[in-house]
Amino acid sequence: MLPTGDFLARALVVAHRAADAAEAVIRPRYRAQDFSVVTKPDATPVTEADREAEAAIKRVLRAEFPDHAFYGEEEGREGEGDFLWLIDPIDGTKAFVRGYPMFSTQIALMHVGELVLGVSAAGEYCERAWAVRGGGAFLNGKQLQVADTREFGAQTAISTGNLKSLAAAPARWNVLADLVRRVGRIRGYGDFLHYHLLARGAIDLVIESDLNILDIAPLVVIVREAGGVFTDLDGRAVGLDTRSALAGTPALHAQALAAFIAAR
């Protein structure tokens, strides 16, 4: 049985409080550039702000939902149960370290494998998006809706993120090249930003081939509640093992997905 609307409304309030707690940790560190950087085994950076922000998020969530499980970028999986909070305290740590504001705090709630709530908080970029299943998506309080773009053409805009594994698959790389030739604009906004832009109708398709669920969990809910479609590059539903993303307006997602599947 899916969680009720009342429960999701309460959980959303708590998730916003958790995002506020993370921002209180992150903002002074970022503005003062007051942190040391350690390289993790996967060659990505981590700072004190990442760890402190994750701890702050969990304190808020645990106070309200002590029986829920957690899966954080820095501390991994903790606990078991039907409800799992997915937490990336600073998605875009490389941007954070280099001093530009393309980073965010990502908080999502999964219930028995289904993403049902998401908050994407980019304080230094002055954007916060959120959504709950069946309740619509919002950015800074304004309801979101994807564009009604149905064909690739001169007015269509695509944004890409990490593409290393796609570049290593020639047939699929050629699919991307064909899409680029057919559209009016190709950009690489990356991280939270291109999903926010997609959800508010400013771009039409997002393609990424190298990510993990913590990078995108709340954004999946936001895009879907704004009327978009979000799967991996093989058309599979997003889950804990997801490693790629294809998100867009319904018509463009369907066309791009057909092309990527045909090129497998």
Image: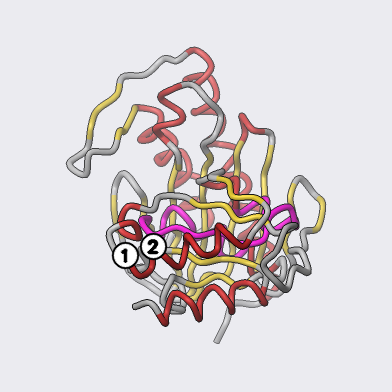
Up/down of 161 relative to 124, above or below: below
What residue lies at 63% left-to-right and 48% top-to-bottom?
16
In the rendered structure, find residue 179 and report the number of the disc placed on it.
none
Q: Quadrant of the C terminus?
A: bottom left
Q: Is residue 193 left or right of residue 53?
A: right
Q: What is the image's colouring?
A: secondary structure
| Residue corresponding to mark 1 | 170
Up/down of 264 relative to 191, above or below: below
What residue lies at 41% left-to-right and 41% top-to-bottom?
54
Q: Is residue 63 left or right of residue 146?
A: left
Q: Is residue 43 left or right of residue 197?
A: left
In whole angstroms, how far apart are the C-alphas of marks 2 and 1?
5 Å
What residue lies at 76% left-to-right and 64% top-to-bottom?
147
| SS under mark 1 | helix
| Residue corresponding to mark 2 | 173
Q: The magenta stretch spans which residues?
A: 195-222
Residue type beneath disc 1: Pro
Up/down of 49 relative to 13, above or below: above
* Neighbour tally class for label 2: few under 14, some 14-19, many 20 plus, Cα within 10 Å: some
Residue type beneath disc 2: Trp
